[in-house]
Each structure stands twice: as structure tokens, then as C-alpha cells.
Image: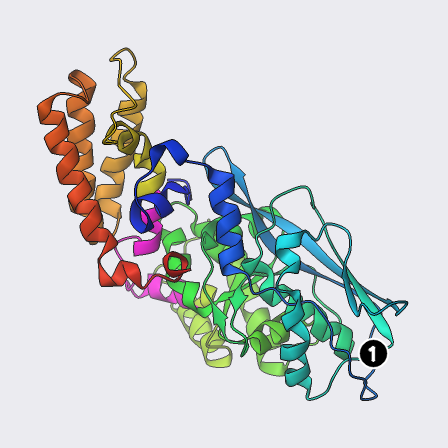
Amino acid sequence: METRRNVATYIVIRDTIEYDTFKPFDILSDMYRCLSILLICLGTTSTGAEFGRNQASVTTVLLKLGDNGPVGFKAILTARVAPKTAQQTARAATGIKADMAVVMNEAARFVGNLYGDEWPSDSTVDFSLSDSYLPQDVPSSSLAFVVLLATLREGFELNDRCAVIGDMLLDGHTRDVGDINARLRGAYEGSCQYAAVPLANQRQVIDLMLTGERHIVWQMQIFSVAHARHAVQLVRTDHNEKLAAAIDAFVKVQAYMKKHDGNVRGNQRIRESLNEILTLTPNHLSARILLSEIQGELPKHLSLERTLAEFSALSWPYLALMAPDRQYQYDGNDTSDFNRITAGLDELKYMGHPKLVTVIQRLIGYGEYIKLRSNRDEAALRRADAIRKELERLRNDPEIMELEWLRR
């Protein structure tokens, strides 16, 4: 099953169902604005602080909208220090669009607090982003901007094979971003060896073990980070002793798994290695997930967020046919789409979160009915009404309402 956060999710679960206003790029753009917390603009008060380096680049993962939903792609964010020639202390140069620039003025506040001083007032920092022609996923790069500003301030080297993904609050604590698995797939396909993801996203990362993407978990080293400081520590090339030892130990686990086609079951030595790695770095998410697999402790179902995303990606054609205005009518000529949707929903029924089982079953029944008859007769309308009531119940479910990406 492919990772998809079809934007119909936001219509089905969060908002009133409006099938005639289904505009994916508009919805994504609104989502970016709502979630923005990117940090760029530098302070203006000089206290004698100096930049540790004049240029740096960091790797992050953004999203673009593909044929089947959001697709992650590796992007490079670069900063250059130049003499200040005007009042600007930071400039959004190549590739930085207006949505991304809106939240840039919070960086100096956080990074200044992090280092306990202000930034030099006689310099300007120019930022550029690769692939500037694509939509910019503002919140998922917040941590990357902080890492970039920190290396300019302190002068340490960055590992360009480490993807930094995540949103953050003004106090530096991370918060989750949507489509984390699409982002990790983008990092993997971009040949990244490491990835930093928000602590709140770790349950969604486990979904990779259930959807045929287990290789991403062990062929990369994925770390969960609770604070921006942890992301900075991870992406530096001069790791502390414990982190360096954990990374080296996991490289040996990777070598064993590659030799044995990814199999680790029943291997006591690998179990001990994973426990040692977690003793050194408890936030080594790849090690934690593999150890859970060995111990038989992995969840049996997808996370609620992933199930909602999969459900929306599969179900929106049926939901369009259910629209109260009856704008769309099935002509009965082509059943291939019905068969594809039903097969996907049937798979999701057994793998997905239990909260959605009822609505999935009803939607399967609705599709099978209208495939043979019509979406406009009384029986079809009764089925559609039952599904809408179930969707309304889900919209009001406390656990669903608490999902970060739905609240924003």
C-alpha cells in the first residue's frame, strides 16, 4: 500500500464535505500557511558576537503533490553571510517564497536565546532553497532553519547525508508534521543515511513496518528529536562519544541485515546490539522499532493518522458520488475503478485503525451497490446518509480531534 495523504482527508474529517471545491494545491497552500513556524530573520542588536562561518547548507525534505498524493523530495537549504548594505539583516534570496518568508522573523529570538546573545548587526544572511519552482512545505523545514543558523553562529560542520525534518514551537520543542512516511521515503530515495524526525511522529514511522517499507527503517538511521537542540547535535559531524558509538554500532547491524536479506529474528547478538544502542541513545528510532519487532511488540494496525490518510486517498471518488447535490452520477459503463477502490478498502479494513472499520465496511457496501445499480435511487441515498453520519461521528471523536495536523 502506498503512502498517501490525499487532501480529501481535510475535507472529509475536518471540514464540511464540499466536492465541487476540491482544489489540492489551494488546500496544501492553506495548510502551509496555517502550520508555518519557519525561522530565518536575524536580530539587529550587536553585542560583539561573530559568525563562526560564512556559508553552510543543510538537507531537508519537502513535499510536492504527485499523482497519488504528496511525495517527499530532498531539498538543500543554503545560507551565506554578506556585508550588510541596507537595513535588512536577512534576505530571502533564491527560491524562498512569500509563504516561507512570513515566519522568518522568529529565528533570531530562538537562536539568540539558545546561545545567550544576539547576532552581529553588520552582516546580512542570504538564504536560498533548491527546487524553488515547487510548492514549499514550510513547517517541515523549521528544524532545518534552526540547524543552519546554529552552524553559522558556532561554525561546526554539517552532515549533508542527514535529513532534518520537523516543525517546532517558539520554545524549541518539536511538533509533528503530516506525511512523515512520504518525507522519509524522499530522504531514502535521496540517499540520506540519517534522518531526524519530531518525537510526536514516531508512531507514524512504525507504519513503515506494516506497509512493505520496512527497508527504510533499517537502511537509514532514523532518530526522534524532542527539541531543536537534539536536531543540532545529530546533524553535526563532530558527534559526542555516545552518539558516535551508537551510530557505529547500528552500521554493524545494517551490515548483518544486508547480508541476511533484512532478517533479524531469533538473533540474540542483534538483540543485544540494539539494546546497547538504545542505552547510548534512547532516541534511536530505527533501533527501537527493530527491537520491538524482534520482541513481537509491534502494533498490529496502522496508526490513526495513516489510516485516515489511506482512507481519504481511496474513498474520495465514492464520497463525490454521495454528494447531496447529486452532481455526479455513475453511468455504469466502467467498473475498474470500483474494483480497485474496493480492493484497497478491503485491505485497509484489516490493516487500518479499528476506529475506521465501520465506515470502511459501509463504504465497501455502498460501492458494490452503486456499481450494479445507481447512486441516485432510494437505497443508495440511505446508504450514503449512514456513511455521512459515521463521518460526522469520526469528526467529533476526541482522539481524531487531537491529531496535530487536523487542529492546525
Judging depth in this view, the residue of 353 and 390 nearest the camera is 390
Residue type of the residue flagged with mark 1: Ser
Work out whether 340 lies above or below 130. Answer: above
Q: Is residue 159 magenta?
A: no
What's the image's color scheme?
Answer: rainbow
Q: Secondary structure at mark 1?
A: loop
- The residue beneath circle 1 is 121
Work out whether 154 lies above or below 370. Answer: below
The image shows residue 76 at horizontal and vertical percentages of 70, 54
The residue at the point 14 percent across, 26 percent down is 380
Quarter in which the C terminus is drawn: bottom left
Direction top: furthest residue: 333
Work out whether 261 lies above or below 289. Answer: above
The image shows residue 41 at horizontal and vertical percentages of 71, 69
Judging depth in this view, the residue of 129 and 219 nearest the camera is 129
The residue at the point 64 percent across, 81 percent down is 240
Which span of residues is magenta-colored? Answer: 288-310
Judging depth in this view, the residue of 170 and 197 nearest the camera is 170
Q: Is residue 303 magenta?
A: yes
Q: Quadrant of residue 59?
A: bottom right
Q: On the picture, is 150 further left or further right than 290?
A: right
Work out whether 16 lies above or below 295. Answer: above
Q: On the picture, is 4 further left or further right than 333?
A: right
Judging depth in this view, the residue of 288 and 152 nearest the camera is 152
The secondary structure making up most of the magenta span is helix
The image shows residue 273 at horizontal and vertical percentages of 46, 72
